C-alpha cells in the first residue's frame, strides 16, 4: 500500500549543533511530530562535546569519540542539515539569515550556538590571540602546534593562557601534560616548555570553593606552570616572530601562542535582530527556555540566560536543558501550554589534570586529584556520547 505523505504545516529550525540541540534531534527522531519540517543549521558537521575536549587535548580520546556526528543525527531525526553560519534573524518575517545560503523560514526557531570569549576590549587580542571558542578553530590550531613540535622538536615553546577560570586552568593542565609527554618521548629537556596563565583576580577559578582553588593552584605550581595572578591583560602585540602579552601592572611576557579563555560573550547579531538580551548579548529567556521578547524564539545552553534563575555557562546545564527544550518546542508547535525548567542549584564539576586524574567539586565540597575520579568522568562522558553513536534502527 502506498503511504500518504503528511502535509507540512509548520517549520521548526534549530540554529547550532550544541548539546541541547543534539538531544532535541535525538528525541524528535525517537518520537517524530507529524506535519513538522525540521531543519538544523550548523557551521560544522561534527559538534564537539565540551566534557571530553580537555581529554582530547591531552591525547586520551580520538576525534570521533568526542564529536557528535550531526549528519547522522539529522538523518535519524528526519531533519534537513544546512552546513552554514547563521548571521542574523529577520523576526518580522520569521527567517534565519545565513552567510552562504538563502534565508530559512520558520514558525518556531531555537538557538543553541554556545558562546565565544570576549576579546574586543583588549587591543591586539582579536588579531593575535586564539579564542577557546569556536572549538573547531582551537583544535585546528592545536593540531598544527603539535605538528610543528614534531618537525622542530628542540625549539623552545612558550604558551600564554589569558583567563584563570576553570576553562583556562584545565586547558593549561591538559596542554602541559600532552606537550611534556612528547618531550619525554623525544628525550628533550622539560625546560624548553613554558606555560603562563594570566588572571585578573588574586586567585584562580573564583566561582569554585577555596579548597578546590588552592588544590589546583598547588598542582599548577608543582608542574611549573607560571601563574600571573592579579594581572589584567591590557594589550597584545606582535614583535618580529613573537607575541607579547602586556598587563596593566607593567608586566610583559613574550610567547609563541596566546590562548584566550576569558568571560564568555554572544554574537552581536542576536541583539541586532531585536531579541531581548542581557549585558553580554545572551538571549534572555523565561523558565520555559522561550525568549521574553519573541515567543517564536527559544534558546538553550551558553547562549541563553534564564532571567528567573541565571545558570553558569557550563556544559552540564546545556545537557540538562535538552529534554525540557524538546518538550517545549513540541508543545509550542502543538499550541499547548509550556512546562517550566528548573536548573539545579549546585552541580558536580570534574576537572581533569591531563595526567589521568581529576578533581571533584560541588558547592563547598572538593576531593582529589584521583584516577578514580577521572574514571568516573570518563564513564559519564562516554555514556552521554553513546546515545548519539548507537541510534535505534528505524523501521521503514
Image (tube, helix red, strand yellow):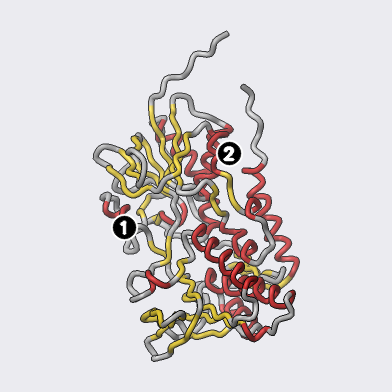
Quarter of the rendering containing residue 181: bottom right
Crowdedness near tag 1: few (<14), some (14–19) or many (≥20) residues, C-alpha within 10 Å = few
Q: In the image, 252: left or right of 271? A: right
Q: Is residue 365 visible?
A: no
Residue toward you, 199 or 87: 87
Residue lying farthest to the bottom in this orientation:
250
Residue 330 position (above or below residue 263): above
Tag of residue 241 = none
In the image, taking residue 137 as reference, residue 294 lies left or right, namely left
| Res. 387 image quadrant | top right
Q: Which residue is mark 1?
A: 268
Position above or below: 130 against 99: below
Choose between 206 and 261: the one closer to the eye: 261
SS for callout 2 = helix
- Label 2 neighbour load within 10 Å: few <14, some 14-19, many 20+: some
Q: Position of residue 333 (x, y in %)?
A: 40, 32
Please give the residue where the numbered disc 2 appears in the rendered image: 72
* SS state under label 1: helix
Residue 147 in the image, given as x and y percentages of width and height: 61, 67
Which part of the image, by quadrant, shows the C terminus?
top right
User: What residue is rendered at 32% in x and 63% in y?
Assistant: 279
Residue at horizontal 35%, vertical 54%?
284
Judge by depth and name the residue closer to the eye, 348 or 227.
227
User: Residue 293: percent from the left, percent from the top?
Assistant: 29, 47
Up-down relation of residue 175 to residue 43 (above or below): below
Residue in the image at 47% along x and 76% along y: 162
Amino acid at each position: 500500500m502506498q503511504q500518504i505523505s503528511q502535509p507540512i504545516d509548520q517549520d521548526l529550525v534549530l540554529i547550532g549543533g550544541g548539546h541541547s540541540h543534539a538531544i532535541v534531534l535525538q528525541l524528535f527522531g525517537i518520537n517524530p511530530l507529524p506535519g513538522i519540517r525540521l531543519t538544523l543549521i550548523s557551521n560544522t558537521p561534527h559538534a564537539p562535546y565540551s566534557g571530553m575536549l580537555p581529554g582530547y587535548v591531552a591525547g586520551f580520546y580520538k576525534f570521533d569519540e568526542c564529536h557528535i556526528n550531526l549528519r547522522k543525527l539529522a538523518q535519524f531525526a528526519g531533519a534537513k542539515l544546512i552546513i552554514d553560519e547563521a548571521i542574523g534573524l529577520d523576526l518580522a518575517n520569521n527567517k534565519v539569515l545565513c552567510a552562504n545560503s538563502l534565508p530559512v523560514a520558520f514558525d518556531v526557531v531555537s538557538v543553541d550556538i554556545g558562546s565565544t570569549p570576549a576579546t574586543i576590549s583588549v587591543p591586539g587580542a582579536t588579531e593575535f590571540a586564539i579564542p577557546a571558542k569556536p572549538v573547531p578553530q582551537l583544535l585546528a590550531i592545536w593540531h598544527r602546534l603539535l605538528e610543528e613540535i614534531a618537525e622542530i622538536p628542540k625549539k623552545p615553546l612558550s604558551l600564554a593562557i589569558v583567563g584563570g577560570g576553570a576553562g583556562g586552568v584545565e586547558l593549561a593542565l591538559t596542554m602541559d601534560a600532552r606537550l611534556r609527554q612528547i618531550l619525554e618521548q623525544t628525550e628533550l629537556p622539560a625546560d624548553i616548555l613554558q606555560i603562563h596563565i594570566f588572571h585578573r583576580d588574586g586567585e584562580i577559578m573564583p566561582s569554585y570553593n577555596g579548597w578546590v582553588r588552592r588544590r589546583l593552584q598547588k598542582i599548577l605550581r608543582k608542574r611549573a606552570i607560571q601563574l600571573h595572578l592579579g594581572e589584567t591583560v591590557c594589550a597584545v602585540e606582535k614583535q618580529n616572530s613573537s607575541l607579547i602579552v602586556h598587563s596593566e601592572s607593567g608586566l610583559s611576557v613574550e610567547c609563541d601562542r596566546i590562548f584566550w579563555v576569558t568571560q564568555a560573550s554572544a554574537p552581536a547579531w542576536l541583539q541586532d535582530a531585536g531579541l531581548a538580551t542581557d549585558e553580554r548579548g545572551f538571549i534572555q529567556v523565561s523558565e520555559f527556555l522561550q525568549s521574553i521578547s519573541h515567543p517564536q524564539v527559544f534558546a538553550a545552553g551558553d547562549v541563553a540566560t534564564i532571567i528567573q534563575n541565571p545558570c553558569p555557562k557550563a556544559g552540564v546545564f546545556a545537557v540538562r536543558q535538552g529534554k525540557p527544550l524538546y518538550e517545549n518546542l513540541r508543545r509550542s508547535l502543538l499550541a499547548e501550554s509550556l512546562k517550566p525548567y528548573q536548573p539545579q542549584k549546585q552541580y558536580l564539576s570534574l576537572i581533569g589534570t591531563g595526567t589521568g586524574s581529576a578533581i571533584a567539586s560541588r558547592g563547598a565540597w572538593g576531593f582529589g586529584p584521583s584516577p578514580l575520579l577521572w574514571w568516573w568522568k570518563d564513564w559519564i562522558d562516554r555514556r552521554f556520547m553513546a546515545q548519539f553513536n548507537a541510534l535505534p534502527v528505524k523501521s521503514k
